[in-house]
Image (tube, rainbow, N blue to C red):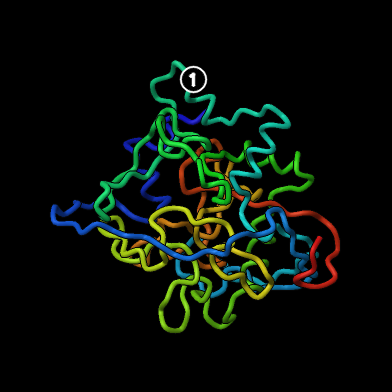
Amino acid sequence: MPRASWFPGIALVYVIAGCGPQAVPENAPKQVASRECPAAIEQGRFVALPSGSYLKGADRLYPEERPSVRLQVEGFAIQAHEVTNDQFAAFVRATGYVTEAERAATSDDPAAGSAVFMRDGRGMNGRWLLRKGATWRAPEGKGSNIAGKGRHPVVHVTLADARAYASWAGGRLPSEEEWEYAASSGLPDPANRFSGAVDDQGQPRANHWQGVFPVRDEGKDGFSGTAPAGCFSADRNGVHDLIGNVWEWTDSPADDARMIIKGGSWLCAANFCARYRPAARQPQESDFSSNHIGFRIIRDGAAPAPGTKR
């Protein structure tokens, strides 16, 4: 069950986001986020990837990305977008599943809760809170909801929650190697490991933080939180949002208590995190949940070619 003891003083959560606390200026201008998204996507579509090799840890920036080694990966099919609120709601309706954050919300334990990054409403951005009542249905805590956000990635899910959904949906979580192979092979510019996040003119290709975290989010990507699945263009394989939007659980352990998450999130910024790259990896407690971690699933089987619908 999610508990505050995972991250004493909330310090660990700042590590996850790749930054530490900073003062919030008083004269902050209000941020206006807007971006036109495609009217609809085919939720649950899978893209088949053939067997192949890739360089794990290519162009590494952080010590945990070592060593660089070429690996062979068997073909598989990957969901073309992160698991959405609509998809997760269908799973809950069919199974009655209750997430760990929901169980924490009804717990008598005062240290139970799920992590929420909170803003001051003026475009200046502030701090992490452990909030009882923050769940996939109420991403900011009690009183919030996901009305109109069925296409947004589900958040406040732990590793166990993600595994339960994957099993019900006939898939599984990707290994770190499978995830990185998919992200690497789909980069718009394979020679530029940041090309999944920004184009050659520095314009956002993915939902991440522009500006100095956590002082100001300039909102150049059109969002100040999660974005609907498929709002940003697909990569060369036809897959959306492997970079940015929300961190994604993998089924690869970092150690006895933590698993690897990949891809960065809407909170990743150049000044601290810069983990919106295929090689970037972050260890995360398996029973942790927050409003910037989600997941996608894959299915086993040989894949004939990229872009094939399964």
Q: Position of residue 259 (x, y in %)?
A: 58, 46
Q: Secondary structure at mark 1?
A: loop
Compared to residue 269, the image places residue 92 above or below, namely above
Residue 81 x, y percent position in the rendering:
63, 58
Between 219 and 250, the residue placed more toward the observer is: 219
Is the residue marked by circle 1 packed among few (<14), some (14-19), or many (20+) residues within 10 Å?
few
- The amino acid beneath tag 1 is Thr
From the viewer's perspective, is 64 left or right of 181?
left
Residue ranking furthest to the top: 108
Taking 124 as reference, is 145 above or below it?
above
Position of 76 with respect to 265 (left or right) is right
Residue at horizontal 39 percent and vertical 32 percent from the top: 131
Q: Quadrant of the C terminus?
A: bottom right
Q: Between residues 169 and 121, which one lies in front from this camera angle?
A: 121
Q: Which residue is tagged 1? A: 106
Q: Is residue 254 shown to the viewer in this render?
A: no
Horizontal side, residue 116 vs residue 263: left or right: left
Q: Is residue 157 above or below residue 214?
A: above
| Residue depicted at 47% across the width and 49% down the height | 292
Check the image and name the residue furthest to the left: 26
Classify residue 61 by image quadrant: bottom left
Q: How many marks?
A: 1
Q: Is residue 67 above or below residue 88?
A: below
> What residue is at 42 percent from the left and 83 percent from the top?
201
Judge from the rendering whether residue 18 lies leftward or rightward of residue 120; answer left or right.
Answer: right
* Quadrant of the rendered image containing residue 133: top left
Instruction: Residue 37: tell me if it is visible.
Output: yes
- For image coordinates 54% across by 63% down, the residue present is 231
* Depth order, front residue of 150/157: 150
Q: Position of residue 40 (x, y in %)?
A: 62, 59
